[in-house]
Amino acid sequence: MRHTLPIAPQFYVTAPQPCPYLEGRMERKLFTALQGEYAEKLNDTLSKQGFRRSQNVLYRPSCAECSACLSARI
């Protein structure tokens, strides 16, 4: 008997860069690749946790001292 377990996504954090929304602040993003047979479920799960999608990348702001950015699904 063979069992296949889903592979947990690997997450990465970008280097600090100027925030495009708040002048004088720096931002970082937490991101992961959207791929494989569980991509649809991963997208659904993480989008409910504030992640956004750009092609095959899921990301969300991950700023140490700021939580001003809020994701909204429309």
Image (cartoon, helix red, strand yellow):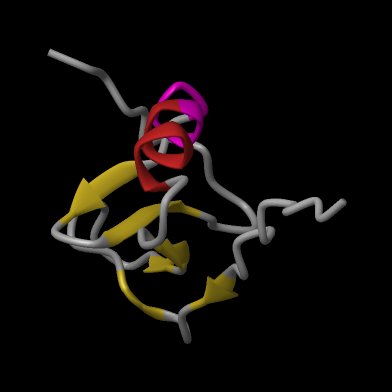
Task: Give the overall secondary structure of the magenta segment.
Answer: helix
Q: Is residue 55 left or right of residue 13?
A: left
Picture residue at 39% right of the left edge, 30% below the top: 47
Tell me the quadrant of the picture where the C terminus can be found. top left
Q: Nearer the viewer, residue 71 or 36?
A: 36
- Outermost residue on the right side: it is 1
Picture residue at 38% right of the left edge, 64% below the top: 25
Picture residue at 38% right of the left edge, 38% below the top: 43
Q: Residue 54: horizontal and vertical position, in percent?
A: 16, 56
Q: How many marks?
A: 0
The quarter holding residue 34 reads: bottom left
Q: Is residue 31 left or right of residue 13?
A: left
The quarter holding residue 35 reads: bottom left
- Outermost residue on the bottom side: it is 15
The span shown in magenta is: 45-49
Q: Residue 18: horizontal and vertical position, in percent?
A: 29, 75
